[in-house]
Amino acid sequence: MKVMPEVCCVVAVLVAGCATSSSEQVAASPEPMVAVADADADPEPAETVTIWDGVYTAAQASRGEGTANSVCFACHSPAEWRTPMFIRVWAGRAIHQMWENIRMTMPYDSPGALSAQEYTDVVAYMLQLNGIPEGDMELPSTAAELMQITVTAEQ
């Protein structure tokens, strides 16, 4: 049975929503409470990184183009990846979701057959095809790092 990524996301949200809050865990804990920093202090805002912040390199996109030419373009064309809707479909999500969707479904005849780096390079190439600016750092190929980059339709 094939599980759609959207279903996995809904299940993950539902499971996360059922977790006990940290304040309930502290109240139920028999261990002594430890003093915490000033509760009235504003937490440092997390730095938001988007695809527009130069999250891949030209060399990485070039490697992705090579992989696309040898593997992906047997079934796809660059034109499919270069449409206004391509980025909008993923807008508001972590780039990890795009990466994971591609990894779990492509190549069609053998999903997951490429290395993590090859999938990442293909995503970098897709970003390049859509006019997303290059940067000095390569797009990472770990889930934790990819979760920190948000796809946005506009800068």
Image: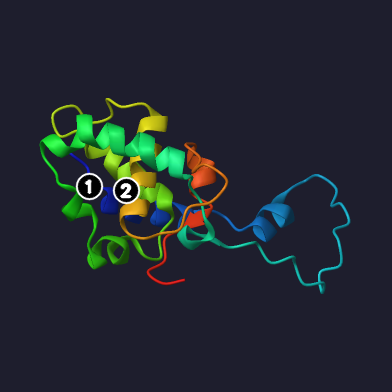
**Is residue 89 toward the left or the right of residue 132 in the image?**
left
Instruction: Give the quadrant of the N terminus.
Output: top left
Return the residue at label 1. Answer: 4
* Residue at (45, 44) in percent of width and height: 58
Q: Position of residue 13 (x, y in %)?
A: 41, 56
* Residue 152 picture location, percent across and down: 42, 66
In this rendering, the answer to whether 138 lies above or below 25 is above
Does 41 sit above or below residue 147? Answer: below
Residue under the image location 41 percent in, 65 percent down: 92
Which residue is found at the position 73% from the left and 54% from the top?
A: 26
Where residue 63 sits, quadrant-wise, is: top left
Query: Could you classify mark 1 by the number of other residues whose Cα lies within 10 Å: few (under 14), some (14-19), or many (20 or more)?
Result: few
Which kind of residue does numbered mark 1 sit on?
Met
Q: Nearer the viewer, residue 100 or 36?
A: 100
Label 2 residue SS: helix
Q: Secondary structure at mark 1?
A: loop
Query: In the rendering, at what x and y percent does residue 54 appear?
Result: 52, 55
**Labels 1 and 2 touching (C-beta < 8 A):** yes
**Can you say whether 132 is above or below 73 in the image?**
below
- Going 39% across and 46% down the picture, which residue do you hit? 124
Q: Which residue is mark 2?
A: 8
Amino acid beneath label 2: Cys
- Left or right placement of residue 84 versus residue 74 in this view: right
Asked whether, in this view, residue 90 is left or right of residue 52, the answer is left
